[in-house]
Structures are given as C-alpha cells and as structure tokens.
Image (cartoon, coloured by chain):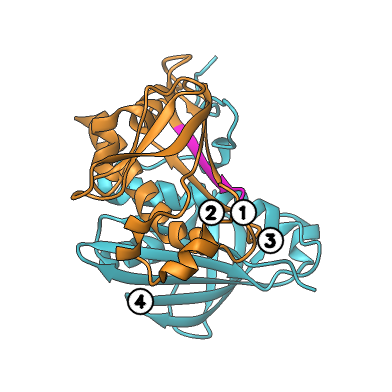
Chain colours: A cyan, B orange
C-alpha cells in the first residue's frame, strides 16, 4: 500500500498568472525555493530540474502544463542515493482564481510504502509555499527554507565574514 | 492527516508575539476570521465567545480556554452544532439532533520560532504557526464544514499579520 499523498492549499493575494510565473521561472524560483532554480522548456515530456549552486537537487519530466491553471511533473530527489532509488513521485499544482486571489493546491503523490522522501517533502512544502505567498504579497520571501525547521536557527550562517 | 482532525502549517514573516496578538486580540481576529471568530480574555478556564458571521453577535456556546501559554500555545474547546448554523449547512432539525451527540472538538495553535535574524540575535524573523483541530469522530460533518474555512482563515491570518508587520 503506497504512502498517502501530501496536499497543501493556500490562498495567495495575487493572480494565477503571477503565481504560475513564480512557480515556473528560473529567475523567481530561487527567491522562495531556498535558492533552487526550477528550469525547463515547459513542454510535456521535457525534463524539469531544480538546481542549486550548480548541483541538481531533483529532476523529472513535465507531465501536464496548462498555464496558468495546471502544472504536473514527475519528481525524484537526486542528492541522496537512497532517496533517488525510491524513484519518481508526482507533483501537481492547481491554480484557481477566486476574486482577486489564487487558490493554489499542491498535491504530491505516488510515494512507495515507507517512503523516506515523504517526510522530507511534508516538511518543506508548507515552508516553500508560505515563502511564495510572502514573495507575491509583500516582496519578502523566506529566503532559506532549509533553516526554517521549526527550531530556532540563524539565517545565512554561511555568509562570508560572519563569526 | 487522519480523518478525525484538520492540520494546517504556515510560516509567517513576523515574531511569535505578533502571531499571538493575531490569535487573541478581538479586533485583529475579525480582520481574518470572516468578520467573526473567537473572543476571550484567553486565560485558562475562561469562556470563549463565538461570532459566526458579520450579522450575528457573539454567542456563548460553552466553549472554554483549555490552555494558554503566550506566545507559544493556545488551546480551546470547539462549539457543538447550533441551530443558527442551519443557514450555512443543509441539516434538518432531525439531523441536527443526531449531530449534536458528537463529542466536542478542540483547537490547538502552536507558535514556534522558525528563523532568527542574522544581525539581531534573539529577534525572530519567521514564525511557524501550526493549527490542529481534532477530537472529531470519523466522517464528522463539523470537520468537513471547518476544513475549507480554516484554509481561508489561516491564509488570511498570514496576509494580515505580514501587512501589519510592514506597516
């Protein structure tokens, strides 16, 4: 029996087009996606990668792309062999306009039993999508989601010159 | 998430104190709680009055503060099904009598520091807010009713807290 799907829904005070652009832009994505740039030519069947500091964090293939309403791609973590071996999961975004807001629903599914990818993405998606909402509404995203683990951590610890 | 509870996590660009104020100050609550929501002095054991919408006043539906530990944790009991809610839900009077036999649910808010300022030690820049609404029976009508509502409320809470923080 496969692990249940992870879903997260949020209302964002921005249009579906603005939200779609942020989710699919190599320039905007690093701002809210912990420095990860999402890249693809966005054609069904094409590769999609999440890259940070020159390294591929995850990759997959575009399965559906209907801007600005529905985006789906396969997703495999690449930076840990054990997670890579779990094989591709399925990421889908639905963007619905509601008044001047967008109702954004993320469904991450097709995990195998006892998936180790599942708890990782369950922690990171609420932070990434909260950061996206802040970026679109206030211009100030949560720049490093890795550090927002629910415990107190200092941001930008890797900054040069910091003691 | 089990079918007896609703859970929502959000990260807010504000301090835990800002988030606590948003959860407990009546005027602030009304900004994101659809013109209504809870009203209390938020001391353990105190009543929590409930305003269902713009037109209805605050009602005492026997809700209580169960725990209050500012700015970290807030727990209060939920209300039972009320006749006044029939304007929003398709329950008959007979169905209402059956529904009112369900146990009362409980709302828990947990407010945690998530990111500290790199230049001002001790200053929290991002706060993680977790809502757990639990104590429902499987298939509860009340749970179905509150799930979509909480989603909108929590989204709006984040928007309002961040707008107030930059103002």
Q: Residue at x 24, y 41 (%)?
A: B31
- Do tag 2 and tag 1 residues touch (Cβ < 8 Å)? yes
User: In the rendered structure, the residue with mark 3 lies on which chain?
Assistant: A
Q: Position of residue A151 (x, y in %)?
A: 60, 29
Q: Earlier in the sequence, mark 4 or mark 2?
A: 4
Q: Earlier in the sequence, mark 2 or mark 3?
A: 3
CA gap, disc 2 and disc 3 = 17 Å
Label 1: few (<14), some (14–19) or many (≥20) C-alpha neighbours in 10 Å: some
Label 4 belongs to which residue? A69
Q: Which residues are magenta?
A: B127-135
Label 2 belongs to which residue? A125
Q: Earlier in the sequence, mark 1 or mark 4?
A: 4
- Circle number at residue A62: none
- Dot 1: element: helix
Label 3 belongs to which residue? A78
Q: Position of residue A5 (x, y in %)?
A: 63, 67
> Looking at the image, is mark 3 or mark 1 nearer the viewer?
1
């Amino acid at each position: 029996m496969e692990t249940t799907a992870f879903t997260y829904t949020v209302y964002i005070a921005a249009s579906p087009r603005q939200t779609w652009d942020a989710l699919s832009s190599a320039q905007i994505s690093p701002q809210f996606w912990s420095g990860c740039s999402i890249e693809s030519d966005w054609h069904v069947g094409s590769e999609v990668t999440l890259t940070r500091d020159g390294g591929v964090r995850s990759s997959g293939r575009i399965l559906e792309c209907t801007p600005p309403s529905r985006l789906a791609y396969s997703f495999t973590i690449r930076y840990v062999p054990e997670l890579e071996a779990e094989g591709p999961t399925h990421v889908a975004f639905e963007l619905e306009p509601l008044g001047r807001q967008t109702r954004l629903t993320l469904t991450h599914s097709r995990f195998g039993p006892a998936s180790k990818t599942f708890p990782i993405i369950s922690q990171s998606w609420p932070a990434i999508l909260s950061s996206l909402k802040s970026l679109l509404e206030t211009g100030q995203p949560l720049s490093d989601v890795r550090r927002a683990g629910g415990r107190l951590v200092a941001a930008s610890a890797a900054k040069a010159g910091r003691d | 998430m089990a079918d007896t509870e609703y859970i929502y996590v959000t990260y807010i660009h504000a301090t835990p104190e800002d988030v606590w104020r948003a959860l407990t100050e009546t005027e602030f609550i009304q900004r994101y709680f659809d013109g209504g929501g809870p009203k209390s002095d938020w001391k353990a054991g105190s009543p929590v009055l409930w305003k269902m919408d713009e037109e209805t006043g605050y009602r005492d539906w026997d809700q209580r503060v169960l725990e209050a530990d500012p700015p970290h944790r807030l727990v209060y009991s939920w209300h039972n099904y009320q006749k006044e809610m029939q304007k929003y839900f398709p329950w008959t009077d007979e169905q209402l009598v059956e529904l009112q036999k369900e146990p009362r649910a409980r709302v828990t808010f947990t407010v945690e520091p998530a990111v500290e300022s790199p230049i001002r030690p001790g200053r929290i820049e991002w706060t993680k807010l977790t809502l757990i609404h639990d104590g429902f029976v499987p298939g509860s009508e009340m749970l179905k009713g509150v799930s979509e509502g909480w989603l909108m409320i929590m989204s709006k809470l984040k928007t309002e807290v961040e707008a107030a923080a930059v103002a």
